[in-house]
Amino acid sequence: MSKLEGESILIMVRRQISWKSIFAEQLSGHGPALALFVALSILLTWPVALTATSHLENEGDAVLNAWTLGWDVTHLLHPGQLPHAPNFYPYPYTLYFSEHLLGAALLIAPVIGLGGNPILAYNLLFIFAFALSALATYALVFWLTGDRAAALLSGLLFASMTLRFGPSPQLQILLNFGIPLTLLFFLRSLHTGRARDAIGMTLAFVGQFLISIYHGLFLCVGLITLGVEQVLRNPSIRHLTRWVGVVLAGVAAAALTLPITWPYLEARRWVGVRGLDQQGLFGLLSFLLVPHGHLYAAFPPFWEIHRYTHVETLFPGIVTLVLAAYGLWRSRSPWRRPFALLMVLGTIFAVGPALRLRLEDPPLLPAMPYILLWRFFPGFQAIRVPARMFVLAQLGLAVLAGLGWHVWRPRPRLRQWVFALTLALAILEAYRGPFPRYPAPSPLPELDQYLAGAHELLPFVEFPTIRTLDILSDPETMRRLVWTQFATLHRGQPTPVGYSGFFPPLFWDVADRLLTFPSRESILFFQDLGIKAFLVRKSGWTSGEQEAFEARWALFQTRFQKVAETPEGTLYLLERNPRPESGAVGVLGVPEGDRIWFFLTLPRSAWPWRISITPGRYTMRIAILEAAGVSSTKILQGTLPLALPAYLEDLPVGWIPRPSGASLLMVEGELEPGDNGRMKLPPPQRIRFQSRIALGSPPLDLPGIFRMPLVEFGNGVMLGAIALSSEAFCPGEALELSLFWT
């Protein structure tokens, strides 16, 4: 061995020893905090760990989160299919109707990949999110102060406030560890200029953004707040060299997040954005609200506040407030001001567009600074609950509390006892009570396997299903919707229902037909929609519900083919409905009183696009001919309904005053069908039409299903036409009608 080789080996050994010693030193210094946070994760979420493989804490957002994780992990290697989840068929980009949780899926992918259980994956993230948030805040405050005790208290307090947020915290709220971690790397990068800190900032920001778009947007506000404060207060930060790493980190983060965010813009085509009137209302009393199982819930004033209607539970805790107040008062740390500013802005923005004392009260101030974010900051138009911005205030309070402990100097003999007492009180405040546990519905393995093994697309509906259109006020309806959506993971087929942050427009037509299914109109509707499979459970029905369904089913059972039956349920396939391959449009002009009504004729045998996810558009130009030639031209234009009722082939589009002296009407125009999403239909094509309507000949009769009440209202709107599905209907069926307003 040469001397040079020996020296190289010696250097490598020294490096290995150095890394081992550093790791051992860090573990001995920070290991107790890590162990405490992990233990508290299990204890404070108890009894989640007992039933982690089969139960969830609610039958709404928890099931949605577990389903999202399952879909993400199984499609991470198929990016083209990932956005188009199987809920709300035939819409595309349905994964992006809510948080996509891709960052959370990457964290837990091995669990789902090895065990195939998204409920277990969800519960593991639910449990250990506390430890992740606490550790990230611990790292931030330790860097700010060098005080392990202060860092431990700050981590515990921040994670505790997150755990107490809302009636049942969602996964995207609990997994907020990227916020303190990003701010840590951001501040370190500004003050050290090291490349590794800029890289850490990029990775932490991207990870948080991939977990929650909400928190990604809020984090941008936090970064801007701290960045501006540092520039204004610290002259050394103003040098451009200090910002090179931060700017490059921001560019890299944008490059990594924009491709993942882009599908949200596509999803906006169908679900739109939320106006200020759709932003979740907020009452100031929410700042004094704690969960019902919390220690303080039995004491005034917290008990009194529970009498009012609130959504978010934002009381930070007495320990947090006392230590943060002391930190504001006594700390001379340069970090006091930036995190106090973060606390103030987070609190103000959390109030939302208007200031109220309680949700049901009129606004005390009709306009709050949050409106500026909604108007000028991209992405805030999709926010539903501005109160979630309080996470910035929570982090600010936690850091100030750490600064407060850091400057508090009790006698040395008492310091350990005071710290232990403070820690114990903080843990008591962190406990929100036991989480409820709800089991997953019993599986239908044989029926699920039939659907999963089909070699064709078999969109399905499961019964029992929707009980009312007032979905959000009926827990049973929500439970059925979300578990039907969850079942798509192992059925491998789409369904037209679902549960998400948005209910797309066509969903309400689906829900309306499900309430009366089966009926003549609803069967034709689902044929037009392309739904082929109907799974009927033998359990899960409420009193009288199954009897009513079976009475209707008996009228139409010949329309369905039974393909599989088990003790748990039966699977039927609906008879096929041949579709035309191209479209044709006709025009009717029907004199009715002093008006001429115009109809677009869209027969079932010649119009395949009876259902679409965007409305079709038409333009009709009517030339009025007199003996001397064309006297005038009228234009009627508008949109088609998303779902043409099965009984409707003549669609009223408007009327013109009946012209005197005119002998002929020349009608021409074009109609463009709407987008059909994932339905297997001929590509939409613009269709032109024209017609001659002679006014002197015997007038056409009004189509038999129509009535023309012509009822005018004070606001200038007129109920022009009513279309009836049938005047004679079978027992157990509903009479469907459509109203047309002009």
Image (spheres, rainbow, N blue to C red):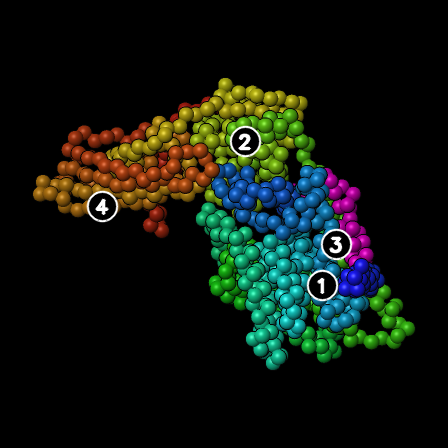
* Near-viewer residue (244 or 558): 244
Distance (Cα) linking label 1 and label 3: 21 Å
Quarter of the figure with residue 82: top right
Q: Vertically, is 419 above or below 521?
A: below
| Structural crowding at the residue carrying mark 1, measured as other residues with C-alpha within 10 Å and reported as few (<14), some (14–19) or many (≥20) | many
- N-terminal of the pair, mark 4 or mark 3, is 3
Question: Does the CB distance between marks 4 and 3 fall below 8 Å?
Answer: no
Position of 624 with respect to 127 (left or right) is left
Residue matched to label 4: 634
What's under tag 3, amino acid-wise? Arg
In the image, which disc is placed on residue 137?
Answer: 1
Residue matched to label 2: 460
In this view of the protein, can residue 85 be seen by the observer? yes
- N-terminal of the pair, mark 4 or mark 2, is 2
Question: Does the CB distance between marks 2 and 3 fall below 8 Å?
Answer: no
Residue 310 x, y percent position in the rendering: 63, 55
Position of 28 with respect to 327 (left or right) is right
- N-terminal of the pair, mark 2 or mark 3, is 3
What's under tag 4, amino acid-wise? Lys
Where disc 4 sits, the SS reads strand
Where disc 1 sits, the SS reads helix
Residue drawn at point x = 59 percent, y = 61 percent: 218
| Structural crowding at the residue carrying mark 4, measured as other residues with C-alpha within 10 Å and reported as few (<14), some (14–19) or many (≥20) | few
- N-terminal of the pair, mark 2 or mark 1, is 1
Distance (Cα) linking label 4 and label 2: 45 Å
Residue matched to label 3: 432
* Near-viewer residue (540 or 234): 234
